[in-house]
Amino acid sequence: MFREDFRRPTSLFSPLTVHQLGLIADPRFEVWADGAFAINRDRRNGNESDGTAFSFETGSSYQVNETFNLSAKIRFRKNSSDRDDGAISIDSDSYGASLFSNIRLPGELVFTPLVAYERSFADIVTRSGGASASGRFTDDIVTIGGVLAKNYAFIGTESTTEYFARPSAEI
């Protein structure tokens, strides 16, 4: 999701966003970072489990002109989950990078092309009685696509507010 200043990538789940760090004297250039940490305790149906999740991403955006920006980001995620009875344990890490932009088109349409890559590693251990089995899985994910969207402001607000509906089409 993008704020209406058109340059700054944001997420509904990223309250730790930092921007306009002033690293260079060019106001068209922004650097940002997001992070999250979560703890999970599931006590349903006798299948008690505990888990943690951590994610961090950072990126930059450059406003080339009034109708085009170019952005890049890198991301790291780590998840861990264990059943209290020792029946299963899962640990995973993933690393990713993406390039994307926003292109303003006639009629207030915005096209956002995206190219992304992510590599994930998962270690799984299952135990039953005295026996156990384990495995390590590696996934490579490549995403190429785009979103075409337009903002429609709610009645009584301007199209530059943060209160709008955004229908979109994705490829």
Image (tube, rainbow, N blue to C red):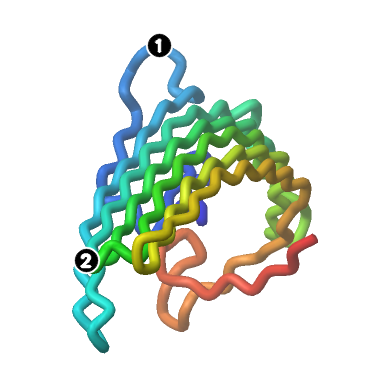
Q: Which residue is mark 2?
A: 84
Q: Residue at x 73, y 47 (%)?
A: 143
Q: Residue at x 41, y 26 (%)?
A: 31
- Crowd class of label 1 (few under 14; some 14 to 19; many from 20; radius 10 Å): few
Secondary structure of the residue carrying numbered label 2: loop
Q: Quadrant of residue 35?
A: top left
Q: Is residue 163 left or right of residue 101?
A: left
The answer to which of 158 and 92 lies nearer the viewer is: 92
Q: Position of residue 42 (x, y in %)?
A: 23, 74
Say which label, 1 or 2, has the lower sequence index: 1
Dots 1, 2 in contact, CB < 8 A: no
Q: Is residue 94 left or right of residue 103?
A: left
Q: Position of residue 113 (x, y in %)?
A: 73, 46
The image shows residue 33, relative to residue 4, as above or below, that is above
Q: Which residue is mark 1?
A: 25
The image shows residue 169, relative to residue 125, as above or below, that is below
Q: Position of residue 171 (x, y in %)?
A: 80, 60
Q: Residue at x 68, y 63 (%)?
A: 149
The image shows residue 140, relative to residue 97, as above or below, that is below
What amino acid type is highlighted by mark number 1?
Answer: Ala
Secondary structure of the residue carrying numbered label 1: loop
